[in-house]
Amino acid sequence: MKVAIKKLKDLERKIIVTIPVKDYESKFNSKLKNIKSKAKVDGFRKGNVPNEVLEQRYGSSIHNEVLNELIQESYPKVISENKIRAACAPQVSIDSEDPKKPIVYSAIIEIFPEIKPKFSRWTNYDKYQIEIEDTDIDSAIDDIKKRYGEWNDVKREAKLDDQVIIDFFGKINGEEFEGNSAKDFKLILGSNSMIPGFETSIVGKKLSKFTIECSFPEDYFKKDLAGVNAEFEIDLKHIQEIKEANIDKDLFTKLQMDIKEESEFRGEIISRMNNEVAAQEKELTKESMYETLLKTNSFQSPKATINEQADLMRKDALMRIGHSEENAGDDLFPIDSFLEKAEKRVKLDLLFAELINHFEIKVEKQQVDDFIEEESKRYKDQEQYKKWIAGQPQQLEQFRMIVLERQLVENLENVLKSSNKVIKFSELANR
């Protein structure tokens, strides 16, 4: 068997495989012999049908079977022996199938890039520090009191921060559209959860039925609705204002706080915010570190892998709004809108794998066990949690990857330069 590899555009490669005549003949004759022992042809005894007759009757199908088997058997060997890291299934074409001559076929594939990690001493990543101010703590407490408060009906005009309960029915040029209506829909005015103009058109209205007009944004996820004007019939059934929750034992129970007095509440909130900040600092620092590595390490990614990742991202986005690829048109979260993020994700994954090899990082069972022990402290029945997680292979693999990434970050901290970046806690909401 002869193999030639040609470089095409970017990461595309054309593999040309030539298979000797004897390999073809060996398979063909073996299959013909097997048929001969079973074939029943008028005028001949079973097992005594001449090869010429069998070839005339079965030759074409045997030929196709042999070609398929030769390709199926040889391609993996070619990939393995030539150490080709294929990123996708091959596009196979048969260049020569004359049984009297060597069989020749071509396979066009994309390969994964060869990456040799570079660590620039001239480019810094940001090491984040998040500052919490008294106003942040006050805002957090106010938010909790509202979140756990009760909505009560009021008889007045609707205003911002009120919750309204409405029925709505929308039309575009007199025609209905997908998602155009709802009954007993709860909406907090000022939440910006609806299209521009929808919520502001309800502000100032009393309990009544009325019609509003507003437009879908130009970047709306459904292309057929982007920038389109719509008319909505509104039935404003309830206007409600929040009665904030009291800081008492009932609230402590809902928040799973092990405290008894109001005087302890602020300290518990500060503790939780500090824990949140510590996790955010690590996450933002890690993101900056990876961004720096992507700038330092420039390489191409296989288009097939990027497209696969974009498709996964689209499926996830559709699932979040209760759709699937089967019932969603191409204009709902078009695949092109995910390609940039998908390419970044693929590059990070490829770089991640190479860095793991570069630093020779391995995860021992004890390290995963220690992580599980750490996680179990978040639950009341720690032993029950550990027993449960032991039977969850997917979760265990996810934990292994977390431990792996932690080690990678530690190694990167030793080879990369950083500069401190201080941001305020209030800025997190805008990131």
Image (cartoon, helix red, strand yellow):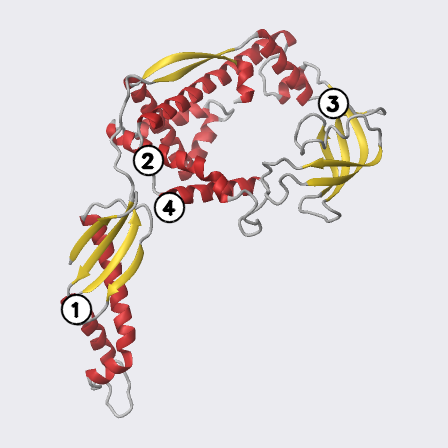
Q: Nearer the viewer, residue 404 or 124?
A: 124
> Can you tell which quarter of the image residue 416 is in?
top left
Separation of residues labelled 1 and 3 (CA atoms): 82 Å
Residue 168, percent across and down?
A: 76, 39
- Is tag 1's residue or tag 3's residue first in the polypeptide sequence? 1
> Can you tell which quarter of the image residue 85 is in?
top left
Residue 194, percent across and down?
A: 67, 33
Q: At numbered mark 2, what does the secondary structure look like: helix, strand or loop?
A: helix
Residue 37 visible (yes or no):
no
Q: Which residue is mark 4?
A: 304
Q: Which residue is mark 3?
A: 160
- Is tag 3's residue or tag 4's residue first in the polypeptide sequence? 3
Q: Amino acid at mark 1?
A: Lys
Q: Amino acid at mark 4?
A: Ala
Q: Nearer the viewer, residue 387 or 71?
A: 71
- Is tag 1's residue or tag 4's residue first in the polypeptide sequence? 1
Q: At numbered mark 1, what does the secondary structure look like: helix, strand or loop?
A: loop
Circles 4, 2 touching at the beta carbon (< 8 Å)? no
Residue 195 visible (yes or no):
yes
Q: Amino acid at mark 2?
A: Leu
Q: Residue at x 29, y 43 (%)?
A: 11
Q: Residue at x 22, y 50 (%)?
A: 6
- Is tag 3's residue or tag 2's residue first in the polypeptide sequence? 3
Q: Which residue is mark 2?
A: 350
146 displayed left or right of 344: right
Q: Nearer the viewer, residue 199 or 379?
A: 199
Crowdedness near tag 2: few (<14), some (14–19) or many (≥20) residues, C-alpha within 10 Å: some
Separation of residues labelled 3 and 2 (CA atoms): 48 Å
Q: At numbered mark 3, what does the secondary structure look like: helix, strand or loop?
A: loop
Residue 383, percent across and down?
A: 45, 28
Separation of residues labelled 1 and 4 (CA atoms): 34 Å
Q: Which residue is mark 1?
A: 101
